[in-house]
Amino acid sequence: MRLTSRLFPNNAKLAQKAKIPSACIIRPLAGPPANKSELVPIVNFGACGVIRCKQCRTYINPYVQFLDNGNLWKCNVCNFKNRVPPAYFNHLDRNGKRQDIATRPELLKGQVEIEAPAEYMVRPPQAPVYVFAIDVSYTAVTSGMLAACVDAIRAALDKLPGSPRTQVAFITYDSSVHFYNLTETLAAPQMIVMPDIDDVFVPLPDDLLVNLKESREMVDMLLDSLPSLFEKSHDMEAALGSAIECAYRLMTHIGGKLCLFQSSLPSVGIGGLKVRGATRGKSSAQPLQALQPVQEF
């Protein structure tokens, strides 16, 4: 939180005369300032679990009040008096503050990261998943987008979070969608072409998502071969919508992030569009047709 004014009148008369407007800039979950090295503290409540108000579920924070020599804490939102867990108990000093407050970031800082126990998880933490969908149409190849895309992905692989559990998959598309089997037991990447872009499916649902560390050699081999594999392609179409649908089906069971690289108008398959400026300047019975949606959902 940062105020727009650094100085304020110290009495009512001066305040009425000055009439200084004030505002507050609030940025939730902001990182530390560039001139400070202090990081957001991490809090682990241990055996007592995350401490929250029993009535309104507010997390314990610096504005709660401890009562009954530290056996109760009063919620600053709903004023409900909660029992302090035995593992979290500590005596109060003569000012009503906990004696261990200096070691409790959740009672000192306005922003902390809380390590959630297992009961806060619907399922165990899943491996990070990254699906790369790359346009390999004639426009993408001749413009240099494909080569630049391959170089960028290769440079980013070592920086992907979650190692050694990170999983990746690759999809390329023009007028058809291409999958790649990168299982570490293969001698070379295996391409699987799906020409039916209107009724898409995942041909090998168990083999297309691979562990990056185990299949790194296959991934590097695929990235090295992609520019030469499509350098003589003259396919002008781009089945963008079909590729997105395939990527969704590929990682729907675990979730993940789709990294999409597109160079031209999606022209065929699911969500295909047409260039609507071709009839510009010609007489038309429907002059507003170009402003209407191409597809109705």
Image (cartoon, rainbow, N blue to C red):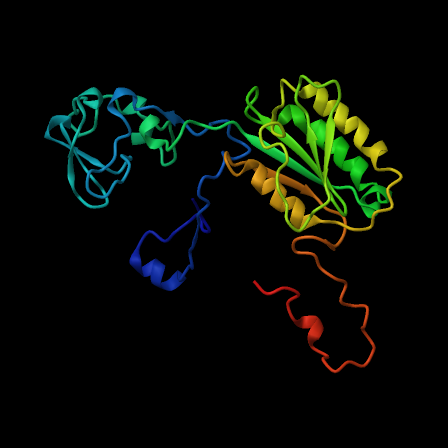
Of residues 45 and 116, the one nearer the viewer is: 116
Where residue 222 sits in the image (x, y, percent)? 75, 27
Q: Quadrant of residue 21?
A: bottom left
Q: Position of residue 104 (x, y in %)?
A: 30, 25
Q: 212 or 192, which is in the foreground?
A: 192
Q: Nearer the viewer, residue 231 or 87?
A: 231
> Which quarter shows the N terminus?
top left
Residue at 44% in and 27% down? 125
Q: Residue at x 82, y 50 (%)?
A: 236
Q: Inspect this view and state whether residue 108 appears.
A: no
Q: Position of residue 264 (x, y in %)?
A: 76, 51
The answer to which image quadrant residue 289 occupies is bottom right
**Which quarter of the figure has residue 119?**
top left
Q: Residue at x 16, y 25 (%)?
A: 92
| Lateral position of residue 58 relative to residue 73, left or right | right
Taking 188 as reference, is 178 above or below it?
below
Outermost residue toward the right in this view: 232
Q: Can residue 250 be seen here?
A: yes
Residue 288 point in image, percent of width and height: 69, 77
**In the drawing, does residue 225 fall left or right of residue 180?**
right
**Is residue 216 placed above or below 150 in the rendered structure?**
above
Residue 5 as seen in the image, left or right of residue 150? left
The quarter in which the C terminus is drawn is bottom right
In the rendered image of this protein, does residue 135 appear above or below residue 90?
A: below
Looking at the image, how many numbered discs can be counted on the residues? 0
